[in-house]
Amino acid sequence: KKATPSDSSASTSSPSTTATTTTTTTTATTTTNNSMSIDATLQRRKNIEEIKAAAEKLALRDNDGYDWNANYYIELTNQRGQVIHLPSEQRQALTVGLTLHAKGQTFMQQQNYTDAIYIMHLAFESFGRVSQEFLHMIDNYGLLALDIVWCYYLAQDESSLSNAGQWLQIAEYGLKRAHGEHLERLRQIRGGGSGGDFIPELSLYVRLNILRALQSFYNNDLNVAHTHLMRAEMDLRKIQISDVDLVRLESMGFTHQESSRALRFCAGDLERAITHIYQKREEREEKLRRERERAMERRKQRQYGATKSGKFVDLKLLQQLQEFGVEHEIAVEALRQTDNSQEALNLCTDPMRKEVLAATLFARCMNDSRLYEIEQVMEVLNGDMVGGDAVAVVSEARVRAALFLAYNDVEEAVSMLSAP
């Protein structure tokens, strides 16, 4: 405010005091805000580093997660659900990259674009440790670069968008190496199921051309921007579906997601889309069935215990030993002692070594460390009280034998002893 002539003395001192106070307050507020901003940034970076450390730790669990203490593990599969086997270092780097990319996509969905971009850069560093030969076979590398630039767009970061040419080149190069120059690899994978030029992955190229158009626009190259927009529009038309057909499928009880996806995969053919939906449902059921079987195998392997190197007992080798006539318990112990090697067969077929093996196995089962499990089984089975004393239903020897056969699984031992 301007000072009034009627109060010149007040106006002389007051403005200076006010200015000083305002300056001091502003400085204090700015310092506090900067401090809070720095603390928040450091905390976010710490959280992301923890995510990276967890991803690296998870990637160390090899052998498709069949290490002894792995409650969680990552499995690399292709679009058909088949497990991909890679050298250990390559698999670990790829696993970390995929994990961080997935987390970055989660941040992107939460509109946390700053952290999304940061963690995707970490994912890009991990992908950089994977051989080019394998990276050219998958589209995750190009898709990651595309997602980084897409975050720039969603965050309305014009400066980063105008300088995103290198990222877009990586995205285009990676996608074309994985899909083929004219998407021929995708058509081969689809087996002609999509029909003609109708390929769902065209949506990636719609995004790519939109981002290229934006980058050209910010660099004042309007002709190139117009060309990329035209390409995006052409690809978008190829993946558009009929709203009428979509409503018809949803009225049949199919979800919106599976209806729209089926129409895209089947080039808008309604009958083929229905067949596609049922086929995908069957594939999901089959995948769940295989996962349940693997979960049962893992539970069984945990009962068998760990080998010398801390791995689970190989069930295929166990089955082979049993086909040679080796007793189940002896075969398991042999595989544990030989670390799942072919030497287990020699160990089981040599009478002297087999006798030592059986003695070792029985001594371990009779160890007093199993006393608590023995008491658990006897408490369950000897629960009937008569005159204040428990009626002995099973002896300790039978309980020990049952635990021996059940690999110290209390529930299974109780079930075995309770059977008529």
Image: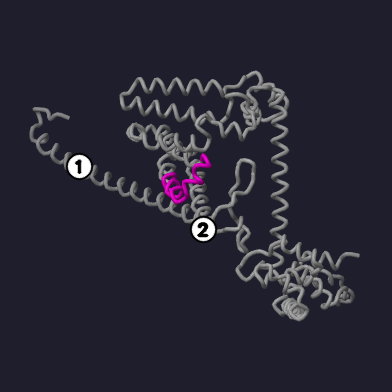
Classify mark 1: residues with Cα within 10 Å, few (<14), some (14-19) or many (20+). few
* Highlighted range, magenta: 119-139
The first of marks 2 and 1 along the sequence is: 1
Comparing 124 with 138, the one in front is: 138
Identified at 72% across, 72% down, the residue is 333
The percent position of residue 324, horizontal first and vertical second, equals: 80, 66
Q: Can residue 132 be found in the magenta stretch? A: yes
Rendered image: mark on residue 234? none
Comparing 390 with 387, the one in front is: 390
Tell me where residue 195 sits by quadrant.
top right
Query: Is residue 189 shown left or right of residue 332?
Result: left
Query: Is residue 61 shown left or right of residue 306?
Result: left
Query: Is residue 392 shown left or right of residue 178?
Result: right
The percent position of residue 249, horizontal first and vertical second, equals: 69, 24
Comparing 26 with 279, the one in front is: 279
Classify mark 2: residues with Cα within 10 Å, few (<14), some (14-19) or many (20+). few
- Gap in Å between the C-alphas at discs 2 and 1? 50 Å
Of the residues shown, which amino acid type is indicated by label 2? Lys
Q: Nearer the viewer, mark 2 or mark 1?
A: 2
Q: Is residue 264 above or below residue 60?
A: above
Q: Which residue is mark 2?
A: 57
Q: Are marks 2 and 1 in contact (CB under 8 Å)?
A: no
Tell me where residue 266 sits by quadrant.
top right
- Magenta segment, principal secondary structure? helix
The percent position of residue 414, horizontal first and vertical second, equals: 81, 67
Rendered image: mark on residue 23? 1
Q: Can residue 102 be found in the magenta stretch? A: no
Query: Is residue 147 shown left or right of residue 275?
Result: left
Identified at 43% across, 22% down, the residue is 229
Tell me where residue 268 sits by quadrant.
top right
Q: Is residue 335 above or below residue 396?
A: above
